[in-house]
């Protein structure tokens, strides 16, 4: 059956072929020798009708272990948090959903206001003076923070904690290679950065120390102890933080951080099979002009009416290339809007309550698992909503996760993938979404599989 609404008709095809002076599509490939051209028929299925295709795709989608049907204990950067229904309603509005970037601020006031409010929320959460309009994700934000520190101090050495997310460290090293920057990694002890080793790695050539708190193991770092180590050599302290945890923890800006970055995924952004997410980037006032991306500001027009403008744009398209601080040319405006709607919906008290639920449920799960006898907590450091459990020596975490999936739940992260010394350890995430019954079922399933 031919559909009239399809963009390419046979008449269109013939007109295009006639315009370029050939009679058939095959002639387009005449320059490719016949001997190396594939002459057979590709081994793909026959074309399906629309109802058949929809039925087939629904069948494939049903194979996904989604959060609606499977209790999830997997975190490691992407978390199963409750997403208020109002978020989808707001971001589905065409003026937000189709907006790309405010090249003409005078007709993009709604988009600019949304970004301005996102920046304001991030500043309040992190305790910093200024935040940009968002980054691609948390890993990108961390790498850009390292690049800022290198440019600001004119030094070529960065010290990063081994408890930083492994993928973020990879992005950092890739960025550093292009800048000819040395990246040195400090080890950990009992789940947090080894302060003594970190101190021994810091010298007069160190541009910055990069830490994550809560870190990849879920443990809360001692920022107060790290801050003087880098500031005494006039370097910068960069802290990557889960923004939801800042509903309970002291803001990094109040602990001496120069730059605070992270991923806004816990703030109303769906897991979406691993992305996209939204990175945030906040800084103290003295580093504002070195921040990557853009900053939206609030002003008034000649009639005294409130308006929003692009206050600062440090990207290469707007200023001389050699003075650009970053080649990142966009931001995650739609996902930043998700975070803004989430924060405005929850309010200060709501954020505290959700953070407290994450803390309490994670500690309940840790106590339940630890009391089983066959599993133990790997670290004694304080943690937020993730913790590491030690399974019996030689235990195959991948096998356990496969069998947990067959039992109808998503298990924790196999730390042996990134930390060889933790080959039989699992990183378990417990958010406000998990019930007491789900935690008990998970614990029982783990015990049975050991």
Image (cartoon, grey):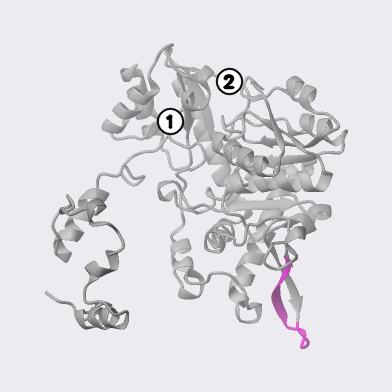
Q: Total number of numbered labels?
A: 2
| Residue reaching furthest to the bottom | 303
Pick whichever, 368 or 53, lies toward us.
53
* Residue 248 appears anywhere in the view: no
Crowding at label 2, few (<14), some or many (≥20) Cα neighbours within 10 Å?
Answer: some
Magenta stretch: includes residue 309: yes
The residue closer to the viewer here, 264 or 182, is: 182
Whether residue 78 is in magenta: the answer is no
Q: Where does the N terminus fall, quadrant-wise?
A: bottom left
Q: Earlier in the sequence, mark 2 or mark 1?
A: 2
Residue 272 position, x and y percent, is 41, 51
Direction from residue 444 to residue 322 in the image, left or right: right
Q: CA distance from mark 2 to mark 1?
A: 16 Å
User: Which residues make up the magenta segment?
Assistant: 301-312
Secondary structure under tag 2 reads: loop
Give the quarter of the image for residue 190.
top right
Residue 9: mark? none
Q: Which residue is mark 1?
A: 412
Rendered-image quadrant of the C terminus = top left
Q: Residue at x 21, y 83 (%)?
A: 11
What element does badge 1 sit on? loop
Query: At x 65% / y 22%, what residue is drawn?
Result: 188
Residue 122 horizontal/vertical position (percent) = 67, 54
- Residue 379, disc: 2
Q: Residue at x 69, y 55 (%)?
A: 326
Sort mark 1 into few (<14), some (14-19) or many (20+) by Cα contacts within 10 Å. many
Percent coordinates x, y for residue 21 in the rendering: 29, 80
- Return the residue nearer the eye: 254 or 138: 138
Q: Quadrant of residue 106?
A: bottom right
Please determine whether, in this image, residue 447 is positioned above or below residue 318. Answer: above
């Amino acid at each position: 059956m031919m559909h009239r609404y399809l963009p390419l008709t046979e008449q269109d095809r013939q007109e295009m072929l006639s315009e370029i002076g050939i009679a058939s599509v095959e002639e387009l490939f005449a320059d490719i020798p016949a001997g190396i051209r594939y002459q057979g028929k590709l081994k793909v299925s026959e074309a399906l009708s629309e109802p058949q295709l929809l039925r087939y795709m629904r069948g494939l989608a049903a194979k996904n272990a989604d959060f609606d049907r499977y209790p999830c204990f997997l975190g490691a950067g992407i978390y199963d948090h409750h997403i208020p229904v109002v978020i989808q309603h707001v971001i589905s509005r065409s003026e937000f959903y189709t907006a790309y970037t405010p090249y003409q601020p005078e007709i993009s006031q709604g988009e600019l206001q949304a970004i301005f409010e996102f920046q304001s929320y991030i500043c309040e959460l992190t305790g910093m003076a200024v935040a940009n309009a968002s980054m691609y994700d948390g890993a990108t934000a961390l790498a850009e923070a390292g690049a800022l520190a290198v440019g600001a101090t004119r030094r070529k050495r960065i010290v990063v904690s081994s408890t930083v997310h492994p993928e973020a460290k990879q992005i950092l090293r890739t960025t550093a290679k292009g800048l000819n920057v040395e990246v040195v990694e400090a080890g950990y002890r009992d789940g947090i950065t080894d302060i003594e080793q970190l101190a021994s790695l810091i010298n007069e050539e160190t541009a910055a120390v990069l830490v994550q708190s809560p870190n990849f193991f879920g443990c809360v770092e001692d920022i107060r102890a790290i801050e003087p180590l880098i500031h005494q050599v006039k370097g910068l302290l960069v802290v990557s933080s889960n923004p939801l945890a800042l509903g309970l923890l002291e803001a990094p800006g109040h602990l001496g951080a120069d730059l605070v970055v992270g991923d806004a995924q816990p703030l109303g952004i769906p897991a979406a099979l691993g992305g996209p997410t939204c990175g945030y980037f906040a800084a103290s006032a003295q580093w504002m002009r070195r921040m990557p991306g853009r900053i939206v500001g609030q002003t008034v027009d000649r009639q005294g009416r409130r308006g929003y403008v692009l206050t600062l744009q440090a990207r290469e398209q707007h200023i001389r290339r050699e003075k650009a601080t970053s080649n990142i040319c966009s931001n995650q405006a739609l996902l930043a809007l998700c975070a803004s709607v989430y924060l405005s919906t929850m309010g200060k008290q709501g954020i505290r309550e959700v953070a407290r639920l994450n803390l309490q449920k994670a500690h309940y799960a840790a106590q339940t698992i630890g009391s089983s006898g066959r599993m133990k907590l790997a670290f004694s450091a304080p943690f937020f909503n993730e913790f590491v459990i030690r399974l019996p020596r030689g235990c195959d975490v991948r096998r356990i996760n496969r069998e947990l999936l067959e039992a109808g739940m998503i298990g924790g992260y196999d730390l042996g993938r990134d930390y060889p010394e933790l080959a039989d350890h699992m990183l378990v995430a417990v958010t406000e979404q998990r019930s007491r019954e789900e935690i008990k079922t998970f614990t029982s399933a783990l015990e049975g599989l050991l």
